[in-house]
Image (spheres, grey):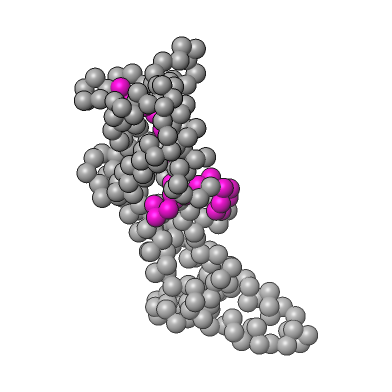
């Protein structure tokens, strides 16, 4: 198998195609006519519409002698932010409502009974200057408890398969887990399209068609069916599972 290397001094057909694909079809890590660029938390580069958090890092033309012709390898980086419970948005009333009796007994045993908080906030700060501080000490302890529960969910070893066996695919970053995995998908590239790139006789219609085929492959990949598609599917399901289970902790309103 031979893949184009854009750094080669010798520019062959595949190298020319490589440059055209990445200059004309890949839109700053999104795709031509597909996706938003330069948006999102923490300076993420792009999202493809309807495809979760994912960026196209490279489009690589490949001449595989085992196949009938050329193909385009779509190098994707899937990323995710799994938020943990935090003081911001934390609702002690929701904790009182949703926590089991065993949980409430445990909170009381660590001097963090959420049922005390409302009374502390209602006290006159001039007469009880430490009441607010005491209330927030309780809240901090409760948030720490729920963060630990979220950590158990994200750190479950069954998630390693979704992370392609890499326990460091998602790392803790201040108030959330962030990270991702790399996946490579493929679409065929016809001889006529290769010829058009080689002779620079391509037009917007051809570029749009290729971009649409690439986008369709990305959008359909979560159906599984190949090792790379299955990896993408497992990743998306695992991130969704983590977020759903953390929401079930019911510590927000």
Q: Position of residue 234 (x, y in %)?
A: 31, 49
Q: Which residues are magenta?
A: 38-63
The answer to if 49 sits in the magenta stretch is yes
Give the answer, above or below, for where 72 lies relative to 113.
above
Give the answer, above or below, for where 137 lies relative to 196.
below
- In-front residue for pair 58/232: 58
Give the answer, above or below, for where 126 lies relative to 206.
below
**Residue drawn at the location 74% of the way across and 84% of the way down:** 125
Left or right? Give the position of 160 relative to 57.
Answer: left
Q: Position of residue 43 (x, y in %)?
A: 58, 48
The answer to if 243 sits in the magenta stretch is no
Left or right? Give the position of 173 relative to 247.
Answer: right
- In-front residue for pair 172/16: 16
Q: Position of residue 133 (x, y in %)?
A: 68, 74
Q: Position of residue 61 (x, y in %)?
A: 36, 27
**Residue drawn at the location 68% of the way across and 80% of the way down:** 131
**Residue drawn at the location 48% of the way across and 53% of the way down:** 81
Left or right? Give the position of 17 relative to 123.
Answer: left
Give the answer, above or below, for where 24 lies relative to 8.
below
């Amino acid at each position: 198998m031979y893949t184009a290397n854009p750094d080669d001094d010798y520019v062959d057909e595949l190298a020319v195609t490589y440059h055209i694909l990445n200059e004309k079809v890949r839109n700053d890590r999104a795709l031509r006519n597909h996706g938003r660029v330069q948006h999102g938390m923490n300076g993420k580069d792009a999202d493809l519409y309807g495809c979760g958090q994912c960026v196209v890092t490279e489009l690589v033309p490949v001449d595989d002698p085992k196949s009938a012709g050329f193909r385009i390898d779509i190098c994707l980086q899937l990323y995710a932010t799994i938020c943990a419970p935090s003081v911001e948005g934390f609702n002690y009333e929701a904790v009182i409502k949703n926590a089991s009796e065993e949980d409430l007994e445990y909170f009381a045993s660590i001097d963090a009974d959420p049922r005390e908080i409302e009374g502390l906030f209602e006290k006159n700060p001039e007469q009880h200057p430490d009441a607010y501080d005491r209330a927030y000490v309780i809240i901090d302890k409760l948030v720490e408890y729920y963060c630990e529960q979220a950590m158990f969910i994200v750190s479950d070893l069954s998630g390693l398969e979704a992370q392609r066996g890499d326990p460091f695919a998602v790392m803790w970053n201040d108030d959330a887990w962030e990270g991702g995995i790399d996946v490579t998908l493929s679409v065929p590239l016809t001889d006529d399209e290769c010829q058009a790139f080689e002779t620079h006789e391509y037009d917007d219609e051809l570029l749009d068609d290729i971009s649409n085929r690439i986008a369709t492959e990305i959008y359909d990949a979560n159906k599984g069916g190949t090792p790379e598609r299955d990896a993408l599917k497992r990743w998306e399901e695992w991130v969704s599972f983590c977020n759903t289970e953390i929401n079930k902790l019911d510590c927000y309103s």
